[in-house]
Image (cartoon, rainbow, N blue to C red):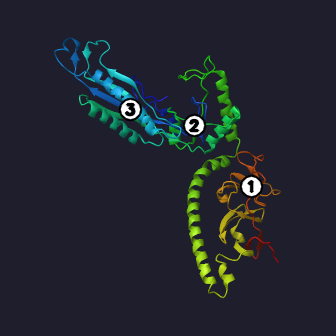
Amino acid sequence: MPTNRRPSLPKFHAGQGAGCAFMLEQGVRGDFAIIAKPGWSVAWEEVGLCWFKVIVRGDLNYTGVRHVIKGRNPIVHAAKVISLLEEWFSEYTEKNTSGLVAPQGSINAIQAGWTHKPAFIPAACHFYVDLRISPRVSPMEARRQFGEAVERIVKANPELSVEWEMILSIPGSFTDPKDWIVQSCMRAWEFVESKKHAPRTATSGATDANILRAAGIPTARLGMPRLTAATGNQRSVFSMERSNIAGMKQLTKCLTYAAVDTCTRDRQEVLQSAATEAVMKIRLSSETAARSMESSVAHTVDQDRQRRSRTSPWPRYDEAALGFRNYWYPAMMSHKLRRRDRSRLRILGEKLLFIRHQGKCFALEDRCAHRGMPLSIGRCEFPAPTRSPAVIMVGRYDVANGICVAALTDGPDSPIVGKAKVKTYPIKERKGLIWVFIGDGEASCA
Protein backbone atom coordinates (compact mmCIF):
# COMPACT_ATOMS: atom_id res chain seq x y z
CA MET A 1 0.00 0.00 0.00
CA PRO A 2 1.52 3.40 -0.92
CA THR A 3 2.65 5.13 2.25
CA ASN A 4 5.36 7.50 3.43
CA ARG A 5 6.97 7.34 6.86
CA ARG A 6 4.76 7.93 9.85
CA PRO A 7 5.24 11.36 11.47
CA SER A 8 6.50 9.71 14.66
CA LEU A 9 9.32 7.83 12.91
CA PRO A 10 12.76 9.48 12.77
CA LYS A 11 13.89 7.94 9.47
CA PHE A 12 12.59 9.29 6.18
CA HIS A 13 13.48 6.34 3.93
CA ALA A 14 10.39 4.29 4.71
CA GLY A 15 7.35 3.19 2.75
CA GLN A 16 6.78 3.41 -1.02
CA GLY A 17 8.47 0.08 -1.72
CA ALA A 18 11.59 0.83 0.35
CA GLY A 19 11.52 -2.70 1.78
CA CYS A 20 11.15 -4.27 -1.67
CA ALA A 21 13.97 -2.13 -3.07
CA PHE A 22 16.22 -3.05 -0.11
CA MET A 23 15.44 -6.75 -0.64
CA LEU A 24 16.52 -6.50 -4.27
CA GLU A 25 19.68 -4.57 -3.35
CA GLN A 26 20.63 -7.37 -0.94
CA GLY A 27 20.52 -9.93 -3.74
CA VAL A 28 17.12 -11.48 -3.05
CA ARG A 29 15.61 -11.53 -6.51
CA GLY A 30 14.39 -13.86 -9.24
CA ASP A 31 14.09 -13.99 -13.01
CA PHE A 32 10.36 -13.23 -12.74
CA ALA A 33 7.87 -12.04 -10.13
CA ILE A 34 4.14 -12.38 -9.47
CA ILE A 35 2.33 -9.79 -7.36
CA ALA A 36 -0.70 -11.32 -5.61
CA LYS A 37 -2.99 -8.31 -5.17
CA PRO A 38 -6.79 -8.00 -5.59
CA GLY A 39 -8.12 -8.45 -9.11
CA TRP A 40 -9.17 -11.82 -10.60
CA SER A 41 -7.32 -11.45 -13.90
CA VAL A 42 -3.73 -11.19 -15.05
CA ALA A 43 -2.37 -7.64 -15.32
CA TRP A 44 0.95 -6.68 -16.86
CA GLU A 45 0.89 -2.95 -16.22
CA GLU A 46 -0.20 -0.59 -13.49
CA VAL A 47 -0.28 3.05 -12.59
CA GLY A 48 2.39 5.03 -10.79
CA LEU A 49 1.53 7.90 -8.50
CA CYS A 50 2.35 11.52 -7.79
CA TRP A 51 1.48 13.22 -4.52
CA PHE A 52 1.01 16.96 -4.24
CA LYS A 53 0.90 19.18 -1.17
CA VAL A 54 -1.40 22.15 -1.74
CA ILE A 55 -1.35 25.20 0.57
CA VAL A 56 -4.24 27.65 0.48
CA ARG A 57 -3.33 30.91 2.23
CA GLY A 58 -5.69 33.07 4.28
CA ASP A 59 -5.63 35.47 7.26
CA LEU A 60 -5.24 34.53 10.91
CA ASN A 61 -8.42 35.63 12.65
CA TYR A 62 -10.78 35.06 15.58
CA THR A 63 -14.48 34.25 15.51
CA GLY A 64 -15.30 37.05 17.95
CA VAL A 65 -13.97 39.80 15.68
CA ARG A 66 -14.37 38.38 12.17
CA HIS A 67 -17.22 40.84 11.53
CA VAL A 68 -14.91 43.70 12.49
CA ILE A 69 -11.61 42.52 11.03
CA LYS A 70 -12.30 41.22 7.57
CA GLY A 71 -10.11 38.41 6.27
CA ARG A 72 -9.93 35.32 4.15
CA ASN A 73 -10.74 31.97 5.68
CA PRO A 74 -8.27 29.47 4.10
CA ILE A 75 -10.50 26.51 4.99
CA VAL A 76 -13.41 27.97 3.03
CA HIS A 77 -11.12 28.82 0.12
CA ALA A 78 -9.56 25.34 0.27
CA ALA A 79 -13.03 23.81 0.02
CA LYS A 80 -13.55 25.74 -3.21
CA VAL A 81 -10.23 24.57 -4.65
CA ILE A 82 -10.99 20.98 -3.63
CA SER A 83 -14.40 21.13 -5.30
CA LEU A 84 -12.89 22.41 -8.55
CA LEU A 85 -10.10 19.81 -8.49
CA GLU A 86 -12.70 17.07 -8.03
CA GLU A 87 -14.31 18.23 -11.26
CA TRP A 88 -10.90 18.22 -12.98
CA PHE A 89 -10.07 14.64 -11.92
CA SER A 90 -12.62 13.16 -14.34
CA GLU A 91 -11.11 15.25 -17.16
CA TYR A 92 -7.63 14.04 -16.17
CA THR A 93 -8.76 10.38 -16.13
CA GLU A 94 -10.37 10.60 -19.55
CA LYS A 95 -7.26 12.20 -21.04
CA ASN A 96 -4.81 9.66 -19.60
CA THR A 97 -6.75 6.39 -19.87
CA SER A 98 -4.95 3.80 -22.02
CA GLY A 99 -4.09 0.11 -22.01
CA LEU A 100 -5.28 -1.49 -18.77
CA VAL A 101 -5.26 1.69 -16.69
CA ALA A 102 -7.61 4.59 -16.01
CA PRO A 103 -5.58 6.80 -13.61
CA GLN A 104 -7.67 8.43 -10.87
CA GLY A 105 -7.14 11.43 -8.63
CA SER A 106 -8.32 12.00 -5.09
CA ILE A 107 -7.91 14.38 -2.13
CA ASN A 108 -7.54 12.27 0.97
CA ALA A 109 -5.89 14.35 3.70
CA ILE A 110 -6.36 17.89 5.03
CA GLN A 111 -4.76 19.93 7.81
CA ALA A 112 -5.88 23.29 9.21
CA GLY A 113 -6.50 25.04 12.53
CA TRP A 114 -6.31 23.67 16.04
CA THR A 115 -8.70 20.98 17.25
CA HIS A 116 -8.33 22.16 20.86
CA LYS A 117 -9.25 25.79 20.06
CA PRO A 118 -11.51 26.03 17.02
CA ALA A 119 -12.29 29.64 17.92
CA PHE A 120 -9.34 30.73 15.76
CA ILE A 121 -9.24 30.90 11.97
CA PRO A 122 -5.86 29.57 10.75
CA ALA A 123 -3.59 31.39 8.32
CA ALA A 124 -3.32 28.41 5.99
CA CYS A 125 -5.00 25.15 5.05
CA HIS A 126 -3.00 22.23 3.70
CA PHE A 127 -4.45 19.34 1.74
CA TYR A 128 -2.87 16.43 -0.11
CA VAL A 129 -3.63 15.07 -3.59
CA ASP A 130 -2.98 11.50 -4.75
CA LEU A 131 -2.77 11.57 -8.56
CA ARG A 132 -2.27 8.22 -10.30
CA ILE A 133 -0.27 8.23 -13.55
CA SER A 134 -0.25 5.94 -16.58
CA PRO A 135 2.87 3.92 -17.46
CA ARG A 136 2.91 6.05 -20.62
CA VAL A 137 2.92 9.36 -18.71
CA SER A 138 6.03 10.56 -16.87
CA PRO A 139 5.82 12.14 -13.39
CA MET A 140 6.94 15.45 -14.86
CA GLU A 141 4.13 15.35 -17.43
CA ALA A 142 1.63 14.63 -14.63
CA ARG A 143 3.12 17.52 -12.66
CA ARG A 144 2.63 19.80 -15.66
CA GLN A 145 -1.02 18.75 -16.04
CA PHE A 146 -1.70 19.30 -12.33
CA GLY A 147 -0.01 22.70 -12.43
CA GLU A 148 -2.12 23.79 -15.39
CA ALA A 149 -5.29 22.76 -13.53
CA VAL A 150 -4.34 24.78 -10.43
CA GLU A 151 -3.35 27.76 -12.56
CA ARG A 152 -6.71 27.63 -14.34
CA ILE A 153 -8.56 27.53 -11.00
CA VAL A 154 -6.65 30.54 -9.60
CA LYS A 155 -7.09 32.52 -12.79
CA ALA A 156 -10.87 32.03 -12.63
CA ASN A 157 -10.92 32.86 -8.91
CA PRO A 158 -8.41 35.67 -8.25
CA GLU A 159 -9.31 35.87 -4.53
CA LEU A 160 -7.56 32.52 -3.99
CA SER A 161 -3.94 32.29 -2.86
CA VAL A 162 -2.67 28.81 -3.70
CA GLU A 163 0.79 27.25 -3.54
CA TRP A 164 1.68 23.65 -4.31
CA GLU A 165 4.59 21.23 -4.64
CA MET A 166 5.08 17.63 -5.75
CA ILE A 167 6.20 15.58 -2.74
CA LEU A 168 6.25 12.10 -4.29
CA SER A 169 6.72 10.63 -7.76
CA ILE A 170 6.76 6.93 -8.66
CA PRO A 171 6.49 6.15 -12.39
CA GLY A 172 3.98 3.61 -13.66
CA SER A 173 5.38 0.43 -15.20
CA PHE A 174 4.54 -2.42 -17.56
CA THR A 175 5.81 -5.81 -18.63
CA ASP A 176 5.42 -6.98 -22.23
CA PRO A 177 2.18 -9.05 -22.25
CA LYS A 178 4.02 -11.63 -24.39
CA ASP A 179 6.63 -12.13 -21.67
CA TRP A 180 6.92 -15.63 -20.25
CA ILE A 181 5.57 -14.90 -16.74
CA VAL A 182 2.51 -13.05 -18.04
CA GLN A 183 1.70 -15.84 -20.49
CA SER A 184 2.26 -18.48 -17.81
CA CYS A 185 -0.16 -16.71 -15.43
CA MET A 186 -2.72 -16.48 -18.23
CA ARG A 187 -2.41 -20.21 -18.89
CA ALA A 188 -2.89 -20.80 -15.16
CA TRP A 189 -5.99 -18.60 -15.06
CA GLU A 190 -7.48 -20.36 -18.09
CA PHE A 191 -6.73 -23.75 -16.52
CA VAL A 192 -8.61 -22.80 -13.34
CA GLU A 193 -11.49 -21.00 -15.07
CA SER A 194 -11.75 -23.29 -18.15
CA LYS A 195 -12.26 -20.29 -20.44
CA LYS A 196 -10.21 -17.76 -22.35
CA HIS A 197 -8.56 -15.08 -20.25
CA ALA A 198 -9.85 -11.53 -20.54
CA PRO A 199 -7.81 -8.74 -18.90
CA ARG A 200 -9.42 -6.29 -16.51
CA THR A 201 -9.23 -2.70 -17.71
CA ALA A 202 -9.72 0.75 -16.11
CA THR A 203 -7.48 -0.13 -13.16
CA SER A 204 -5.86 2.46 -10.90
CA GLY A 205 -4.14 0.48 -8.17
CA ALA A 206 -0.40 0.68 -7.50
CA THR A 207 1.80 -2.02 -5.95
CA ASP A 208 5.47 -2.89 -5.51
CA ALA A 209 5.33 -4.26 -9.06
CA ASN A 210 6.58 -0.79 -10.04
CA ILE A 211 9.65 -1.33 -7.86
CA LEU A 212 10.27 -4.82 -9.27
CA ARG A 213 9.92 -3.70 -12.88
CA ALA A 214 12.17 -0.70 -12.26
CA ALA A 215 14.81 -3.24 -11.18
CA GLY A 216 14.39 -5.06 -14.52
CA ILE A 217 12.27 -7.98 -13.27
CA PRO A 218 9.32 -8.96 -15.53
CA THR A 219 6.27 -8.95 -13.26
CA ALA A 220 2.68 -10.13 -13.55
CA ARG A 221 -0.16 -9.27 -11.17
CA LEU A 222 -2.91 -11.69 -10.20
CA GLY A 223 -5.25 -11.61 -7.20
CA MET A 224 -8.31 -13.21 -5.69
CA PRO A 225 -11.86 -12.76 -7.01
CA ARG A 226 -14.04 -10.17 -5.37
CA LEU A 227 -16.29 -11.34 -2.55
CA THR A 228 -19.80 -12.45 -3.39
CA ALA A 229 -22.67 -10.60 -1.73
CA ALA A 230 -25.74 -12.30 -0.26
CA THR A 231 -27.57 -11.67 -3.54
CA GLY A 232 -25.03 -13.81 -5.40
CA ASN A 233 -23.50 -10.83 -7.21
CA GLN A 234 -19.90 -9.76 -6.79
CA ARG A 235 -19.46 -6.97 -4.29
CA SER A 236 -18.64 -3.67 -5.94
CA VAL A 237 -17.30 -2.12 -2.74
CA PHE A 238 -13.73 -2.08 -1.54
CA SER A 239 -13.02 -5.52 -0.07
CA MET A 240 -9.24 -5.73 0.24
CA GLU A 241 -9.56 -6.36 3.98
CA ARG A 242 -11.60 -9.54 3.54
CA SER A 243 -11.48 -12.74 1.53
CA ASN A 244 -12.91 -16.24 1.49
CA ILE A 245 -11.58 -19.77 1.25
CA ALA A 246 -12.91 -20.34 -2.28
CA GLY A 247 -11.11 -17.26 -3.61
CA MET A 248 -7.90 -18.25 -1.83
CA LYS A 249 -8.07 -21.71 -3.40
CA GLN A 250 -8.49 -20.28 -6.90
CA LEU A 251 -5.51 -17.96 -6.49
CA THR A 252 -3.38 -20.71 -4.94
CA LYS A 253 -4.08 -23.00 -7.91
CA CYS A 254 -3.00 -20.26 -10.33
CA LEU A 255 0.19 -19.49 -8.43
CA THR A 256 1.05 -23.17 -8.17
CA TYR A 257 0.42 -23.70 -11.89
CA ALA A 258 2.62 -20.74 -12.84
CA ALA A 259 5.39 -21.84 -10.47
CA VAL A 260 5.40 -25.42 -11.83
CA ASP A 261 5.06 -24.21 -15.43
CA THR A 262 8.11 -21.98 -14.99
CA CYS A 263 10.39 -23.76 -12.53
CA THR A 264 10.21 -27.24 -14.09
CA ARG A 265 11.56 -26.00 -17.41
CA ASP A 266 15.13 -25.42 -18.46
CA ARG A 267 16.10 -21.91 -17.37
CA GLN A 268 17.56 -21.06 -20.76
CA GLU A 269 14.33 -22.11 -22.46
CA VAL A 270 12.22 -19.84 -20.24
CA LEU A 271 14.53 -16.87 -20.48
CA GLN A 272 14.95 -17.38 -24.23
CA SER A 273 11.17 -17.34 -24.60
CA ALA A 274 10.94 -14.21 -22.46
CA ALA A 275 13.61 -12.45 -24.46
CA THR A 276 12.56 -13.69 -27.89
CA GLU A 277 9.72 -11.23 -28.31
CA ALA A 278 11.98 -8.27 -27.55
CA VAL A 279 14.63 -9.63 -29.88
CA MET A 280 11.97 -10.40 -32.47
CA LYS A 281 10.80 -6.78 -32.52
CA ILE A 282 14.34 -5.63 -33.25
CA ARG A 283 14.93 -8.40 -35.75
CA LEU A 284 11.59 -7.91 -37.49
CA SER A 285 12.21 -4.20 -37.95
CA SER A 286 15.62 -4.94 -39.45
CA GLU A 287 14.17 -7.84 -41.48
CA THR A 288 11.45 -5.53 -42.83
CA ALA A 289 14.05 -2.97 -43.83
CA ALA A 290 16.17 -5.70 -45.39
CA ARG A 291 13.22 -7.10 -47.35
CA SER A 292 12.40 -3.63 -48.60
CA MET A 293 15.99 -3.19 -49.73
CA GLU A 294 16.05 -6.65 -51.31
CA SER A 295 12.84 -5.87 -53.17
CA SER A 296 14.35 -2.66 -54.49
CA VAL A 297 17.55 -4.45 -55.52
CA ALA A 298 15.55 -7.27 -57.15
CA HIS A 299 13.56 -4.74 -59.13
CA THR A 300 16.78 -3.11 -60.32
CA VAL A 301 18.28 -6.51 -61.17
CA ASP A 302 15.15 -7.45 -63.18
CA GLN A 303 15.33 -4.21 -65.12
CA ASP A 304 19.03 -4.72 -65.82
CA ARG A 305 18.41 -8.37 -66.79
CA GLN A 306 15.71 -7.38 -69.29
CA ARG A 307 17.98 -4.72 -70.76
CA ARG A 308 20.90 -7.13 -71.15
CA SER A 309 18.74 -9.98 -72.52
CA ARG A 310 17.95 -7.85 -75.50
CA THR A 311 21.62 -7.28 -76.37
CA SER A 312 23.63 -10.14 -74.79
CA PRO A 313 24.63 -13.27 -76.76
CA TRP A 314 24.41 -15.29 -73.46
CA PRO A 315 20.91 -14.50 -72.08
CA ARG A 316 20.70 -17.67 -69.91
CA TYR A 317 24.00 -16.83 -68.25
CA ASP A 318 22.93 -13.23 -67.68
CA GLU A 319 19.67 -14.31 -66.07
CA ALA A 320 21.60 -15.94 -63.22
CA ALA A 321 21.98 -12.68 -61.30
CA LEU A 322 22.65 -14.43 -57.95
CA GLY A 323 23.86 -17.78 -59.33
CA PHE A 324 22.58 -20.89 -61.04
CA ARG A 325 19.95 -22.94 -59.23
CA ASN A 326 20.02 -26.75 -59.03
CA TYR A 327 23.77 -26.83 -58.50
CA TRP A 328 26.09 -27.67 -55.62
CA TYR A 329 27.83 -24.71 -53.97
CA PRO A 330 30.73 -24.61 -51.51
CA ALA A 331 29.39 -23.09 -48.29
CA MET A 332 32.41 -23.05 -45.97
CA MET A 333 35.50 -24.93 -44.90
CA SER A 334 34.63 -28.05 -42.88
CA HIS A 335 36.77 -27.01 -39.93
CA LYS A 336 34.80 -23.74 -39.64
CA LEU A 337 31.70 -25.64 -38.43
CA ARG A 338 32.78 -27.30 -35.23
CA ARG A 339 30.97 -29.89 -33.09
CA ARG A 340 27.66 -28.59 -31.68
CA ASP A 341 28.17 -25.39 -33.60
CA ARG A 342 25.94 -23.44 -35.99
CA SER A 343 26.47 -20.85 -38.68
CA ARG A 344 24.33 -18.56 -40.84
CA LEU A 345 24.93 -17.98 -44.53
CA ARG A 346 23.09 -16.45 -47.48
CA ILE A 347 23.56 -18.36 -50.74
CA LEU A 348 21.71 -17.45 -53.96
CA GLY A 349 19.57 -15.08 -51.90
CA GLU A 350 18.41 -17.86 -49.53
CA LYS A 351 19.16 -17.72 -45.80
CA LEU A 352 20.56 -20.99 -44.49
CA LEU A 353 21.36 -22.28 -41.00
CA PHE A 354 24.15 -24.89 -40.75
CA ILE A 355 24.45 -27.19 -37.70
CA ARG A 356 26.97 -29.94 -36.89
CA HIS A 357 26.18 -32.83 -34.55
CA GLN A 358 28.00 -36.14 -34.06
CA GLY A 359 30.25 -35.28 -36.99
CA LYS A 360 27.34 -34.78 -39.38
CA CYS A 361 26.25 -31.51 -40.97
CA PHE A 362 22.70 -30.32 -41.45
CA ALA A 363 21.32 -27.31 -43.32
CA LEU A 364 17.86 -25.83 -43.16
CA GLU A 365 16.10 -22.60 -43.99
CA ASP A 366 16.79 -19.94 -41.36
CA ARG A 367 13.13 -19.12 -40.82
CA CYS A 368 10.60 -20.42 -38.29
CA ALA A 369 7.61 -21.86 -40.16
CA HIS A 370 5.26 -20.73 -37.36
CA ARG A 371 6.35 -17.18 -36.58
CA GLY A 372 8.69 -16.31 -39.43
CA MET A 373 11.57 -15.44 -37.09
CA PRO A 374 15.15 -16.53 -37.83
CA LEU A 375 15.77 -19.99 -36.35
CA SER A 376 19.34 -18.92 -35.66
CA ILE A 377 18.17 -16.82 -32.67
CA GLY A 378 16.65 -19.93 -31.11
CA ARG A 379 18.33 -22.61 -29.04
CA CYS A 380 19.93 -25.78 -30.42
CA GLU A 381 19.24 -29.04 -28.59
CA PHE A 382 21.81 -31.81 -28.94
CA PRO A 383 20.35 -35.11 -27.63
CA ALA A 384 21.75 -38.63 -27.51
CA PRO A 385 23.62 -39.92 -30.59
CA THR A 386 20.60 -41.99 -31.64
CA ARG A 387 18.44 -38.91 -32.24
CA SER A 388 18.73 -35.92 -34.53
CA PRO A 389 19.43 -32.51 -33.01
CA ALA A 390 16.64 -29.95 -32.93
CA VAL A 391 16.30 -26.20 -33.18
CA ILE A 392 14.10 -24.68 -30.48
CA MET A 393 12.12 -21.59 -31.42
CA VAL A 394 8.38 -21.25 -30.97
CA GLY A 395 8.36 -24.88 -32.12
CA ARG A 396 10.93 -27.66 -31.90
CA TYR A 397 12.18 -28.59 -35.38
CA ASP A 398 14.01 -31.79 -36.26
CA VAL A 399 16.94 -30.56 -38.34
CA ALA A 400 17.13 -33.83 -40.29
CA ASN A 401 13.77 -33.31 -42.04
CA GLY A 402 12.65 -29.85 -40.87
CA ILE A 403 9.40 -31.13 -39.37
CA CYS A 404 7.99 -29.50 -36.23
CA VAL A 405 7.84 -32.18 -33.54
CA ALA A 406 6.64 -30.06 -30.58
CA ALA A 407 5.48 -26.58 -29.63
CA LEU A 408 6.86 -24.76 -26.59
CA THR A 409 3.43 -23.82 -25.28
CA ASP A 410 1.50 -26.99 -26.14
CA GLY A 411 4.08 -29.77 -26.29
CA PRO A 412 3.87 -32.71 -28.72
CA ASP A 413 0.04 -32.50 -28.88
CA SER A 414 0.06 -29.08 -30.51
CA PRO A 415 -1.98 -28.80 -33.74
CA ILE A 416 1.07 -27.46 -35.58
CA VAL A 417 3.09 -30.64 -34.92
CA GLY A 418 3.68 -32.53 -38.14
CA LYS A 419 2.18 -29.70 -40.19
CA ALA A 420 4.69 -26.90 -39.73
CA LYS A 421 7.92 -27.61 -41.60
CA VAL A 422 11.03 -25.72 -42.63
CA LYS A 423 12.96 -26.39 -45.81
CA THR A 424 16.07 -28.58 -45.54
CA TYR A 425 19.02 -28.71 -47.97
CA PRO A 426 21.17 -31.63 -49.17
CA ILE A 427 24.68 -31.49 -47.65
CA LYS A 428 27.96 -33.15 -48.64
CA GLU A 429 31.50 -32.83 -47.24
CA ARG A 430 34.26 -33.28 -49.81
CA LYS A 431 37.88 -32.13 -49.95
CA GLY A 432 37.64 -30.24 -46.65
CA LEU A 433 34.60 -28.26 -47.82
CA ILE A 434 30.91 -28.30 -46.90
CA TRP A 435 28.81 -28.33 -50.08
CA VAL A 436 25.11 -27.48 -50.23
CA PHE A 437 22.65 -28.06 -53.05
CA ILE A 438 20.54 -24.98 -53.86
CA GLY A 439 17.57 -25.57 -56.11
CA ASP A 440 14.29 -27.32 -56.62
CA GLY A 441 15.44 -30.33 -58.63
CA GLU A 442 16.95 -33.63 -57.49
CA ALA A 443 20.38 -33.33 -55.89
CA SER A 444 22.66 -35.67 -57.81
CA CYS A 445 26.29 -36.07 -56.79
CA ALA A 446 28.95 -38.17 -58.43
Residue labelled with disc 2:
43
Local secondary structure at mark 3: helix
Q: Which of marks 2 and 1 precedes in the sequence?
A: 2
Q: Residues within 10 Å of mark 2 (few under 14, many from 20)?
A: many
**What residue is drawn where x is 36% and y is 40%?**
144
Residue type at mark 1 is Ala
Q: Quadrant of residue 195?
A: top right
Vertical position of residue 243 compared to residue 190: above or below: above
Residue 395 seen in the current view: yes
Spot occupied by residue 250 in the image (x, y as percentages of width and height): 67, 28
Local secondary structure at mark 2: loop
Vertical position of residue 114 compared to residue 101: above or below: above
Q: Which of marks 1 and 3 precedes in the sequence?
A: 3
Residue 12 seen in the current view: no
Q: Residue furthest front?
A: 310
In the rendered structure, the answer to whether residue 189 lies left or right of residue 37 reads right
- Residue 196 vs residue 224, the one in the foreground: 196
Residue type at mark 3 is Trp
Residue labelled with disc 3:
88
Q: Quadrant of residue 281?
A: bottom right
- Residue 264 vs residue 335, the one in the foreground: 264
Mark-to-mark CA distance, 3 and 1 = 55 Å
Residue labelled with disc 1:
420
Q: Quadrant of residue 70?
A: top left
Spot occupied by residue 439 in the image (x, y as percentages of width and height): 74, 71
Q: Residue furthest left?
A: 68
Spot occupied by residue 164 in the image (x, y as percentages of width and height): 31, 32
